[in-house]
Structures are given as structure tokens and as C-alpha cells.
Amino acid sequence: MKKGNAYTSLTVIGVLIGILLYGLNTPSDTTILVDNVIDDLTPVAAPDYQNEPEVAELKVQPFNTAEQDRYKRIKEQDAKIEPILSFEDDWCFRSELTKDDIQYAKFQKNEWDLARGSLNFSTRKNSRSKNFTDNDALALSYKVMNKADLITSAKSGDVIAKIALLKRRGLSRKTKINLAHHLLVEGKTGNALVFLVAQKVGPLNRVIRSGREFTEKHKSALMNALVYANFGLERYDDSALLALMAPTKQNQTLKLLSMLTPEDMETVELRLQKFKSRIDEKRLEKGYPPISDIEIPKIAKHDFEWNMGFWFNEAGEEMRLYRDLNASHIEQLTESECTKRVSEQLKKTEEDNAHVEVD
């Protein structure tokens, strides 16, 4: 597991996850239902937006400084690649594309992020920045809304309002979990999965740091976190990896994953299939097709390969273990040629920068 400046933003995120004061002693964390389906993996009734004081506000951002750092570093190392390909070709780095196709790829990524409910609510008003997108403007407009207006919009079916409420104080943990599940039913996996995985991983990291016994209840909560993460990975959405891989500098992710056996991963797969069935049942009630029938756009797979290259470079040991644990189930974790290129190029850029600092 690598150390250094590349981990600055990830370390901050890991610490923020770790200070979340959500316990593991609530029924939704530990109660086993029939067929090994965990209670909090069951999409429940509509959120009641119950106002309850929370101990801490979730501060994990699905696409903040870690995301910005990721793409900045990729752009640094691929600037000399000659643009000869079109968007429809088999390309890896955007700099391989013509100027018009680069713009089209950016547009497609913004559309994909919006479609999967991945918005950056840490955005500050900076419309002059070339990196300030329409999605950023949309997130900012909801960020500045008061909570009462957000709740009114959410009750009327506004999915962006629901996403924004995941970041607000004054809503109970149960209500936020309900919101996140309803977002998954709508196909909005991005921010919802970051939130749901953080609910599991944060308390488990505290168990690891404290040296307390890692019980079967803790392991069950960890397996639920992987259910959420794998639910996204099957749809080429790696958002949950931000919460799962963020504490890598302290080796906590590696320690957590090392607790799991092949038999545990079979249980994860069983729970995942049950969870997807529940999601599809809810989608059917709304007149939606099964979530597996939703077409994954071309840009999603390109974006996913870039992100996998980033994670295999930043948290290689953890990612390889996670890949091996899921070897028979999640084919998306297999490293593609593009993923390997991104990882290798990032590693080379880090080495070059290290030489410059020494000189």
C-alpha cells in the first residue's frame, strides 16, 4: 500500500468517515431475516423525513478532491498522446481523441453522472472555471436550498433533492438509509452507494483501530458493505470504492477484507442476488424495467476503466485482494488493458515527479 502526497485527499476522507459516530448496535445493522437477507438490505417504505438529532453529519464526498486529483494526474501524463481516434473507437485516454470528440466525451460523462445520481455537493460557485460543469451548477442550486424546501421537493419525487438530503443534518439515519434505497430503485447509484457503504465501513474501521474483537456481527456488516459496492460495480459504478478504499493508508481496508473467506463471499453473492430481486420488485411497482435491463452507455465503461486504473495504482494490494475475493462473481474487477495503462502511467508520473523533487 502506497504512501505520500497522493494520499492527502484520501486520508482526509478516511478520517472523516472514521469519525462518523454511527454504532453497530441497531437492528438494521445486525438482524438477519429469512434467506440470509439483512434487514437494511431490504428497500423499505417511503422516507418519512423524520427530524431527529444526529451525532455527526456525513462528510464523505463521492466526487471531490480525490476525483479532481485523479483526473488532474491522468491529464498530466497523457498530454503527449497524439489524438487520432473518435469517440466510437476503442480509446483509453481522452487525449487520444480529436478535439470535438473530447468535448463529446465530457458531455457524455456529465450525462452519465447525472443518470446514475453522482453529484458533487462540495462544489463552490466558480462558473468561470473550465471544470465547472452543468452538473456542478445543478448540485450547487440544491446545496443552497433550505432543508424544508428540499424535503418538499423530495416528497414530490425530486431525486436530486433526495440525493442532496443525504448530506443534510436533522434527518435520522434510518430516514437517510430509506432515501438511499429509494435512489437505488430509481437507478441513482452514485452518491447513495457512497453513503450506504460509509455507514458500514466507518464503524468497522473504529473496531480495527481500537483492537477490539471483530465479531460475526461486524463481519455481517462488512459483507453488507460489499453487497452495496458490488451492486454498483456490476453497473460500472465504482462510487462505493471511495468509502471502501479511503482508509488504505492505515491498512484498515486490507485488514477488513482479510477477515473474509471464500464462503463469506458466497454469502455476499447470495445477499446481492436477493437485494437485486428486492430492488426489481420495487421497480416493477413503479412500472420500471429490471435494473439489469438499463443500458450502460459507452462512456460509463471508459470512465470505469480510468477509475479502476486509479484505484489499482493508489491501493493496489487492497484492490487485488478485493478482485480475488470476487473473482467468480464481479467480472468488472478484472483489469482491462486500459486499466493497466492508466495504472502504469500514473505510477510513472509519480516516479518522474519524485525525481524532480529530489533534483
Image (spheres, rainbow, N blue to C red):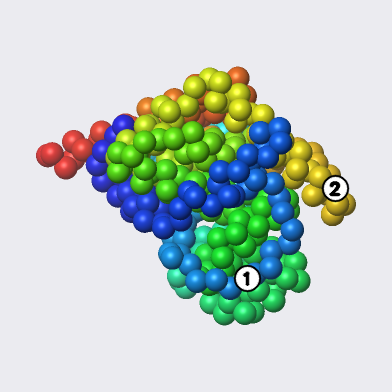
Q: Amino acid at mark 1?
A: Gln
Quick check: 288 left or right of 340? right
Quick check: 40 left or right of 125? right
Q: Where does the C terminus fall, quadrant-wise? A: top left
Residue matched to label 2: 284
Most distant residue in the left direction: 359
Q: Where does the N terminus fall, quadrant-wise? A: top left
- Residue 62 in the image: state x and y as whole percent: 50, 53
- Residue 67 in the image: state x and y as whole percent: 45, 50
For residue 50, the mark is 1
Q: Amino acid at mark 2?
A: Leu
User: Relative to the observer, which residue lies in front, 125 or 57?
Assistant: 57
Upstream in the sequence, badge 1 or badge 2? 1
- Would residue 61 be visible to someone looking at this image? yes
User: Relative to the observer, which residue lies in front, 73 or 280?
Assistant: 280
Question: What residue do we see at 47% from left, 39% from top?
Answer: 218
Question: What residue do we see at 58% from left, 73% from top?
Answer: 51
